[in-house]
Image (spheres, rainbow, N blue to C red):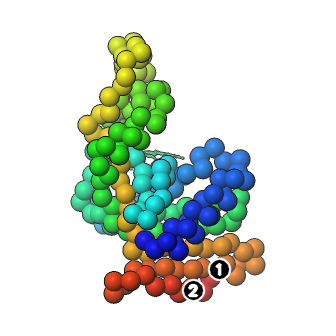
Amino acid sequence: MTNEIIAKFQDWWNQAKADSSLKHKGAMCVSTIDEFGFPNARFVDLKAATEDGFTFCTFLDSKKGLEIEQCQKVALTIWWENVGYQTRVQGNASRISRSMAEKYWKSRNRDAQLTTLCSSQSQPLLSGQQLLDQLSALRASFGEAEIPIPDNWGGYIVEPISVEFLTFSEDRLHLREHYFHSAGRWNRQLLQP
Ligand SMILES: Cc1cc2nc3c(=O)[nH]c(=O)nc-3n(C[C@H](O)[C@H](O)[C@H](O)COP(=O)(O)O)c2cc1C
């Protein structure tokens, strides 16, 4: 990604974070493609945005994880209501390294780590109580010991091929700046609202 794009994204994200009552300031919708060609969209926490791409963490064997293994083409959508900015990204997702995943794992609080350990994300839930029982058993068995990163937990980085920045306008004349990668370079165009 060019410096120009990442700098703009960082600037917008900082503005959104600075003046917001939102609790989840990194909430980002990730769309993947299922085996029938249907898009599947859900929110995750954006962990980092760098020149290499956009990183989020999840279970590698969740629905989204399995879908990404089949089709790396994903879309990211973010709406920052307090500043009126929307960002849309298309790109290719790949797994982050184990050492990066461990870094993010260590940044999670203990409760989140324990919950992650006892959940088989995206699988049918037979009993909520069973999950709670599992959680307290895990909490007791780990005590104060360090909780290791599960093999099926990690993250993805999305390397963009297209990024669109939309500045919302009440009169609906939104400003749309579209950056797209083509013929080996990044191009910029404005789009009609
Ligand atoms: C604000 C918000 C943040 C979330 N962050 C994450 C996240 O970082 N990673 C994750 O796996 N799920 C996260 N979730 C839960 C996902 O939306 C989703 O339910 C879960 O990942 C399972 O999706 P899947 O079955 O399509 O794989 C978040 C949900 C919300 C509402």
Image quarter (top left, top right, bottom left or bottom right) of the C terminus: bottom right
| Distance (Cα) linking label 1 and label 2 | 8 Å
At 61% across and 73% down in the image, what residue appears?
Answer: 166
Which residue is tagged 1? 175
Q: Is mark 2 on a helix, strand or loop?
A: strand
Which residue is tagged 2? 190
Is 30 situated left or right of 172 in this image?
left
At 46% across and 74% down in the image, what residue appears?
Answer: 2
What amino acid type should be assigned to the residue bearing mark 1? Leu
Rendering coords of residue 73 (x, y %): 33, 67
Image quarter (top left, top right, bottom left or bottom right) of the N terminus: bottom left
In the foreground, 171 or 14: 14
Considering every residue shown, the one lying at the far front of the view is 3
At 35% across and 46% down in the image, what residue appears?
Answer: 100
Rendering coords of residue 189 (x, y %): 53, 87
Is 94 situated left or right of 175 in this image?
left
The reply to whether the residue tagged 1 has its Cβ within 8 angstroms of ligand 1 is no
Rendering coords of residue 135 (x, y %): 40, 21
Considering every residue shown, the one lying at the far right of the view is 171
What amino acid type should be assigned to the residue bearing mark 2? Leu
- Where 175 sits versus 83, above or below? below
Dot 1 alpha-carbon crowd within 10 angstroms: few under 14, some 14 to 19, many 20 or more: some
Are discs 1 and 2 less than 8 Å apart at CB?
A: yes
In this view of the protein, can residue 190 be seen by the observer? Answer: yes
In this view of the protein, can residue 133 be seen by the observer? Answer: no
The reply to whether the residue tagged 2 has its Cβ within 8 angstroms of ligand 1 is no
In the foreground, 145 or 176: 145
